[in-house]
Amino acid sequence: MAKTSSKKNANSPHAGAGDDESARGRLLSAATHLFCKNGINATGIDAIIEEAGTAKTTLYKLFGSKTNLVNAVLESEGKQWREWFIGAMEQGSGDAQAKLTRIFPALKSWFAEERFYGCPFINAVGEHDKDAKQFRNIALKHKKIVLGHIEKLAGELGSTEPAVLAHQLGLIIDGAIVAAMISRDPGVADTAALTAGPLLGQSKAKKKRAAEQLEAV
């Protein structure tokens, strides 16, 4: 470990707290990489602690079990991904349509990353017992937040059924993620954008017609 400029008091009740925080971060990072790349079931505890540079006892001290570590990874990854994804839509000026059309360029940049291994939630549910609720509940919580933001923008766009439009776009997004994971082709996002285009155009056209009808009254 690197030396610090000040020494910790070994008798302090806070001694080791920084080490635990550092170890937790390394374990989460290592587990995230290995789970996404190789799969949860195929990744053993030994591989995680070797990549993280920690002891097995540290992992169990901080997380208690591999299952708890998986849950922590999904919660952490979900939060980071949502912040990035929603931020990508909201970045810059423009109306709701402009924000929604930013979805697919953002996905394309993600698909092009060296460590793109697909959606951790799709992967986790896909490789486990389909009757198990453990990972499905975490995945649904993640999806609800993402779709909720898309639904809000769909309402601003003028969709008469913003929840339906949000789910339609969600299906296109999920399909693009799976297709990009299999093909390793970031251009899948461009095709997804073409598929989503008419849906967004129809909603905007309906909003325009509704405004024109109000003006005519």
Image (tube, helix red, strand yellow):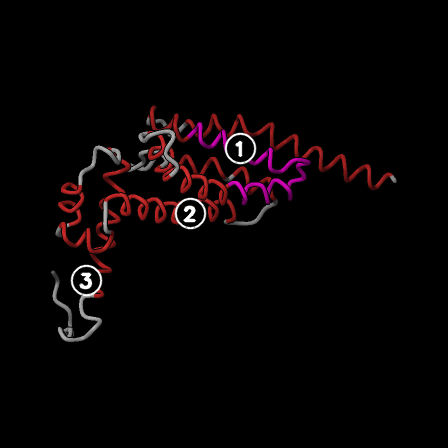
Magenta stretch, main secondary structure class: helix
**Residue 111 seen from this side:** no
Q: Which residue is denoted by mark 1 in the rendering?
A: 169
Q: Which residue is drawn at 23% across and 47% down?
A: 65
Residue type at tag 2: Trp
Callout in the foreground (1, 2): 1
121 displayed left or right of 201:
left
Provide the secondary structure element on which disc 2 rests: helix
Q: Is residue 151 magenta?
A: yes
Q: Which residue is drawn at 69% across and 33% down?
A: 205
User: Where residue 197 appears, x then y in whole percent?
Assistant: 57, 29
Callout in the foreground (1, 3): 3
Quarter of the N terminus within the rendering:
bottom left
Provide the secondary structure element on which disc 3 rests: helix
74 displayed left or right of 52:
right
Q: Which residue is denoted by mark 3 in the rendering?
A: 19
Dot 3 alpha-carbon crowd within 10 angstroms: few under 14, some 14 to 19, many 20 or more: few
Residue type at tag 1: Leu
Dot 2 alpha-carbon crowd within 10 angstroms: few under 14, some 14 to 19, many 20 or more: few
Q: What stretch is highlighted in magenta?
A: 147-176
Q: Which residue is denoted by mark 2 in the rendering?
A: 84
Q: Are marks 2 and 3 in contact (CB under 8 Å)?
A: no
First in sequence: mark 1 or mark 2? 2
